[in-house]
Amino acid sequence: MLPGARALRAAGLLRPPGAAPRTGAARRARCGPRPWPAWRGFALPAGPDLRHFLKAAAAGQPGPSPELPPEPGSTPGAPKVYLETYGCQMNVSDTEIVWAILQKNGYARTKELGEADVVLLVTCSVREKAEQAIWNRLQHLKALKARRPQARAPLRIGILGCMAERLKEEILHREKLVDVVAGPDAYRDLPRLLAVAESGQQAANILLSLDETYADILPVQTSAGGTTAFVSIMRGCDNMCSYCIVPFTRGRERSRPIASILQEVRMLSDQGVKEVTLLGQNVNSFRDLSEVQFQSVAAPGLSRGFSTVYKAKAGGLRFSHLLDQVSRIDPEMRIRFTSPHPKDFPDEVLQLIQERHNICKQLHLPAQSGSTRILEAMRRGYTREAYLELVHHVRDSIPGVSLSSDFIAGFCGETEEDHLQTVSLLREVRYNVGFLFAYSMRQKTRAHHRLQDDVPADVKKRRLEQLIATFREEAARANAALVGQAQLVLVEGPSKRSALELCGRNDGNIKVIFPDAELEDAAEPGAPGRAQPGDYVMVKVTSASSQTLRGVPLCRTTLSRAAASH
């Protein structure tokens, strides 16, 4: 059952829709040694007062001023922030939002850790290994903080994102190393939190929101070369799979208004971005309710044989409408989306992918397990048979589609027979790309409360290794079928292993490596030139492995021209 909004608001973990962030006494409390109950959101010390701004003005530093944000680099001595991103693509997108907010509030960005006045880690909490990486990094930062010259202001360290939401008390109290903790819905509050930390106090804001989407903030793109970009279209998840922490760290589902998404994609197109990935924890359950007239739109049905733990949601412009509008903006821009749930693939979405040349013929269909019994324990809402029926329907609807998936090895109660059913699913579907992990129990999840993590670690490791070996064997076979074919590749830049080669991805999101050579332009014969990041190159595949294609370049071309000649 989903946590009720009324109960969460009563616990101080949610703001009602449209409500402004609480200020003043309602959000103040001391973050002293007295432990707070686990259900309480951290309230905060008072923010900067007049003396803070006078002191900042005397030092020639800007105070937070959203009305008149300083231009980047316009203030000598601006505090420098160093950002590190861990985890999924949503965290990459969040990092860009965080930087956009801090940039408007007078911060400068540095890529050198030793120059930083503020270090912010955008964290992941989906598995124990991801959290352990952050604890290890904090020990390194602790040493850096201790070595900092006394002539410089103390280094401020912040933990942002899902780990901040899940472990706020432990982060703040463990060795008193962290100065700022901000959950995924509290990034707007970062300038104030950092100002509080500047005075020597710890500061935190981990309140979840029913409506925060950062729709009005245009992220500052950070991807190298500017060839590809992520656009967040919705946040949170309502599926409540028993193993998953996301609903508890990112909150309930809420979608950005379509108008703001289209504005951002147009801006990226104007900047020359050639591939946009639409992001969401449950991206294809997108549902825009921002306009009154959207309330009466009929809801699409679920994929055949699939169910949800929540009642059908009426009204709202759905993912198929968004995908249609986004794909019309720029015929030379590829469109991808992740991460979807298999339940939300109505025929209109599949038909749109098949018809539009710039929507990639690549789908992520996270299965998690090949055993119906384990899928039921995971609360996935489908059987093995329903999943396979969807796979067949997808392949019939989109010929040549590339498929990827997620799998968990060693979930609670998984027997050897359950595991072998997952192995057989990998063989039967033959995915092109896979993401496979051993199960890691997460507090707050239904599995933590109701199930036993009873598969020994060595058994999880063995089963995971078998899944990975099976996936690679089948992916190599799937990719080998592309040998001899011409693939349209979007160039991302030089290969990491050789400056004499270029690297990019084909429509199916498979890495393609080919020699950097003079190429004819299909649109301008007789004008050879070398391919640059953002160019489309037709490549004839000569060899394949489970993860990479290699080939020889044929010519430079365009997305539209390649589609027309296909």
Image: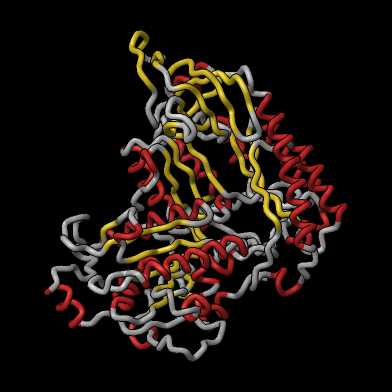
Left or right of 254, for residue 476: right
- State the residue in front, 360 or 210: 360
- State the residue in front, 387 or 292: 387
**Colouring:** secondary structure
Where residue 85 sits, quadrant-wise, is: bottom left
At a point 35% along the width and 47% down the height, the residue shown is: 263
Left or right of 533, for residue 474: right
Residue lying at the far bottom of the rendered structure: 34
Q: Is residue 553 above or below residue 133?
A: above
At a point 38% along the width and 80% down the height, the residue shown is: 202
How many marks can you see? 0
Instruction: Name the quarter where the C terminus is drawn.
Output: top right
At a point 74% along the width and 55% down the height, the residue shown is: 461
Residue 103, given in percent of the width and then of the height, sits at 28, 59
Instruction: Name the quarter where the N terminus is drawn.
Output: bottom right
Q: Does residue 184 show up?
A: no
Residue 81, given in percent of the width and then of the height, sits at 32, 61
At a point 40% along the width and 37% down the height, the residue shown is: 227
Q: Is residue 539 above or below residue 312?
A: above
Q: Does residue 379 show up?
A: yes
